[in-house]
Amino acid sequence: CTMIRLVRRVAAWTICWLAVALVPGVGAGSLVQNADFIACQHNGPRCEFLEVFGADLTGSIPSEIGELVGLKHLWMEENRLTGTLPTELGNLVQLITLDISLNELTGTVPLELAKLSGLEELWLEANHLDGPIPPGIFGLTALHTLELYHNDFSGPIPSHIGLLTAMTVLDLGRNSLTGTMPAELKHLVSLHDLQLSFNYLTGLVPEEVWSMTTLVRLELHDNQLTSKIPPEVGQLTRLERLYLEKNYLWGSLPDELGRLTALLVLDVFSNYLTGTIPASLSGMTSLTGLHIEHNTFSGTLPAAVAGLPALRALDIDDNHFRGPLPAAEMAHLVECDVSNNRRMCGETPACELGTLRPCRLVAEGDAARDERGGWAHAGARARGGALGAAASVSGAALWLAWRARRTRSGQGSAGRDGRAPALV
């Protein structure tokens, strides 16, 4: 087999060009004009490898594409192809790779693709394809890469996804998928990249997902998932990127996260997580980005976590942290935001501080409050009698009402900021 790079000289046109010429509807003029972008590999009289990428081709994919029955690899990505996927693609039964991503194709995926039993890679991302995920795909048991990102697919993720046991990359992100994550994902025993972000998935993250020890990347962000992050997450020791932001996750961060020594990015931004930051996170020695902003975390920021050797980005804003910043440990940070933590204090040039004050001023403010009678509860008690009791009762009632809203927020009924009302 030899690689022939077609140039703008007719003398260089080979049998591969004749094979391409069988599809004149794909902007034949553009093919000639952009011939430097065309590559074709052949072995004998049949074209096996056709690569037409980034050539600014327009028009639809003609049905004649089905006549290239010897094709094993077809790349037509990064063009401006429109129309629907032709059913004749099902004639290319020797295909191993089909990549028609980054075009402007519409309609549904033809059922005829189910005939491509040897297909190993299917790349259709960044088009306008719609309808349910075609069930015929789940019969392609040789498939190890399925890229459907950024289309308009809808409906649930079928449980038959578990039949694709050779899968290593599954990207269904940025569609309109609904329903819950199927537990059958556990059968994808070789999966290292699972991306389901930017959909409308609801319910719990199946416990089986936290046991998929081959995972290197897990993206579930921008859905409506309601789960805790369980201790079992500590089994994902190969994981490098964990994106769970913008869901309805609740509970605290488990200590077992500290076992993820290969983790580069942990992002749980904008959920309903509570509790303190486990000191065990100092075990994530590869971590470069920690994004936990817009939750309800409290307590102090452990110096060992802020000082992780590889950490470059730290976002903890809009939480309930208190106490002084471990400024010395944070000096190496490149990006940092600790703003909107009302009880936190300190100064460090590495961070966006917002309204944070130097700890000295915070201490002086606390002393001044003590002189005036402290918090509103103490002031009410100082005034004595029924007024103090009434204030205490009303404050407790307000607190209980807020807690009730927070409990319901696991189902998405509360606001995003997660702040408790002041007890005044």
Image (tube, rainbow, N blue to C red):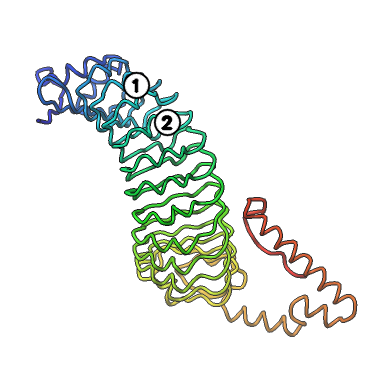
Q: Is residue 284 above or below residue 240?
A: below
On the picture, is 4 further left or further right than 413? left
Q: Earlier in the sequence, mark 1 or mark 2?
A: 1
Residue drawn at x 66%, y 59% as measured from the top left: 407
| Image coordinates for residue 166, horizontal then vertical, percent | 31, 43
Task: Identify which residue, 150 or 155, lies in the foreground.
Answer: 155
On the picture, is 361 further left or further right than 257? right
| Image coordinates for residue 14, horizontal then vertical, percent | 12, 20
Task: Identify which residue, 378 or 390, lies in the foreground.
Answer: 390
Asked whether the beta carbons under mark 1 and mark 2 sit within 8 Å of each other, the answer is no
Residue drawn at x 58%, y 81% as measured from the top left: 360
What is the quadrant of the N terminus in the image? top left
Quarter of the image where one finds residue 418: bottom right
Quarter of the image where one finds residue 63: top left
Q: Secondary structure at mark 2?
A: helix
Q: Is residue 18 above or below residue 347?
A: above
| Image coordinates for residue 116, horizontal then vertical, percent | 29, 28
Q: Which residue is mark 2?
A: 135
**How many C-alpha atoms fall within 10 Å of the one at disc 2: few (<14), some, or many (≥20)?**
some
Residue drawn at x 39%, y 23% as measured from the top left: 110
Task: Report, in whole angstroms, how far the alpha carbon at label 1 lies from the one at label 2.
Answer: 29 Å
Q: Which residue is mark 1?
A: 58
Q: Is residue 52 above or below residue 260?
A: above
How many numbered marks does the figure carry? 2
Q: Is residue 286 above or below residue 77?
A: below
Task: Identify which residue, 266 or 332, lies in the foreground.
Answer: 266
The three-letter amino acid code for the residue at tag 2 is Pro
The three-letter amino acid code for the residue at tag 1 is Thr
Disc number at residue 409? none
**How many C-alpha atoms fall within 10 Å of the one at disc 1: few (<14), some, or many (≥20)?**
some
| Image coordinates for residue 344, horizontal then vertical, percent | 58, 73
